[in-house]
Image: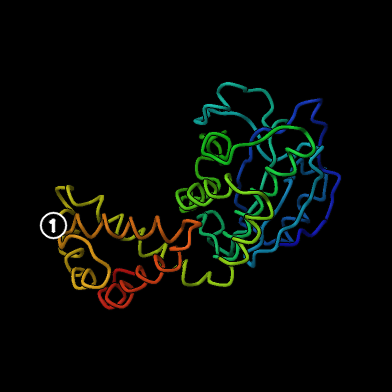
Amino acid sequence: MEIIPKFITSGGDRLGTKPIIIVNHISAGTMQSMYNHFSNPANLASSTFGVSRKGEIVQYLPFELKPWTNGRIQQPTAPIIKELMGDPNRYSVTIEHEGYANHGLDGNLTEEQFLATCWLHKHIQTEVMNRFGVRIPLNSHQVIGHCHIDSVGKPFCPGRNFPWTRLYSELAIADKMTMEEYSERIDYLSRDGSKRSTAYAIAERVKSLGERLTDPVWGAAARAKLNWLIPVLDHVGGETTPEGIVKRVLELYSTAMGSGKYSPEGVRKLLLFEPIMRERGLL
């Protein structure tokens, strides 16, 4: 992937502090409005990177400067913020994601945007290691959102629907690879992105229904909906119960999102659920 340099002056001195966390944000504006806002020092706002809805990556600040984007610490929920406190801008690299008109804060990323931000997280890890000698683990402890720093003023940033579960799952794979190895994986996923996006939607919907099986209000409806999917098990295996369907779908999703040779087969089998799920209004 390519990084477009659009450097601005709205940054600060890290004062000897090394970046150890990656913080994700969402913007209600376009990439152009984001740049216009960041490029005016009077706004006291900036980010290290921005990722567009098309999957373009823009770099606004060099790694050596701190971004002006994390604001104040207010009732933080991230353990690392509670431990370090101080100015989180000094020890972070930040990613601003382009939102879209009227729904810029919901956190839904396009498939291109999701894959680009996964690659960018790995790039940041690699560059911080090369420049500062510090390795940022790509996990939920050191990859966080603005909401985990300020749960009062920014309780939803980077969005209610930001794909945290999928992001952490993908970053767990990236964390074990070199930059070159992971770049090849992203290239592969990009070429098959629409199928994988649908596979993810199928798995998330089935998982959601599975979580409602014991709910006193929604349990019966969730069980009935999962039973609609039983015929697909003839082709993918698994126990013919609602619980069995959930278990099998999550197994297939784990395989599909992995880096092994069976990943394409996992995607193929998940997509067998698509026709009946669309017909029944589950997708």
Dot 1: what SS?
helix
Residue 219 shown left or right of residue 175 in the figure = left
User: Please, is residue 257 above or below residue 148 in the view?
Assistant: below
Within-10-Å neighbours for mark 1: few <14, some 14–19, many 20+ = few
Q: Quadrant of residue 53?
A: bottom right
Query: Could you tell me residue 119's position as x and y percent?
Result: 64, 55
Please say whether residue 132 is visible from this viewpoint: yes
Q: Quadrant of residue 97?
A: bottom right
Which residue is painted at 54% across and 60% down in the image? 109
Tell me residue 260's x, y (percent): 48, 58
Q: Quadrant of the C terminus?
A: bottom left
Given residues 125 and 227, the one toward you in this image is 125
The number of numbered badges drawn on the structure is 1
Residue 57 rendering spot, x and y as whole percentages: 71, 59
Q: Image quadrant of residue 280?
A: bottom left
**Residue found at the very far front of the displayed protein:** 261
Q: Nearer the viewer, residue 152 or 278?
A: 278
Of the 4 image quadrants, the one containing the N terminus is bottom right
Looking at the picture, does residue 16 appear above or below residue 137? above
Instruction: Mark yes or no: residue 150 visible.
Output: no
Judged left or right of residue 8, residue 172 is left
Q: Is residue 96 left or right of residue 202?
A: right
Q: Position of residue 85 (x, y in %)?
A: 62, 23
Residue at 50% from the left image edge and 55% from the top image edge: 106
Q: Residue at x 77, y 44 (%)?
A: 43
Q: Is residue 36 above or below residue 264?
A: above
Instruction: Provide the residue designation for mark 1.
Output: 220
Image side of residue 104 versus residue 20, left or right? left
